Image (tube, rainbow, N blue to C red):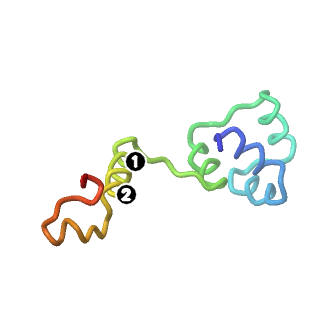
Amino acid sequence: MQIEQALRSALTGPGRQDVQHKVGWDDSQVSRFLNGGQGIVIDKIDLLVAAVGFVMVTCKYLDAVSTLGEVGMHCECARQGQGECSRRI
């Protein structure tokens, strides 16, 4: 899901009042934001993004998680001296 889709859904769905409260917006501000007539001030970006369940991580972090998933966090092969499970032929 794209951030735009998540924001639109959160600001128009059943939990919209909770999101509005977290960023301090009223209905008219939400309407202007969704129609492109209002931006968001930089100190509220984190609040808005967190309110819809997103967190910011770096590509380096995602690469590390991907590598751990590929190799296996509990790789018995490596523990037994047989190399990495994902590298076996």
Find the residue positioned furthest to the left. Answer: 81
As drawn, is 84 to the left or to the right of 32?
left
Mark 1 vs mark 2, foreground winner is 2
Q: Amino acid at mark 1?
A: Leu
Q: Nearer the viewer, residue 35 or 58?
A: 58
Q: Nearer the viewer, residue 85 or 4?
A: 85
In percent of width and height, residue 20 lies at: 76, 52
Q: Sequence-wise, which precedes: disc 1 or disc 2?
A: 1
In percent of width and height, residue 8 lies at: 77, 43
Mark 2 lies on a secondary structure that is helix
As drawn, is 70 to the left or to the right of 25?
left
**Circle 1 sits on which residue?**
62
Q: Marks 1 and 2, how far apart in space? A: 10 Å
Q: Nearer the viewer, residue 48 or 57?
A: 57
Asked where in the image residue 45 lies, by quadrant, the reply is top right
Q: Amino acid at mark 2?
A: Gly
**Circle 2 sits on which residue?**
69
Mark 1 lies on a secondary structure that is helix
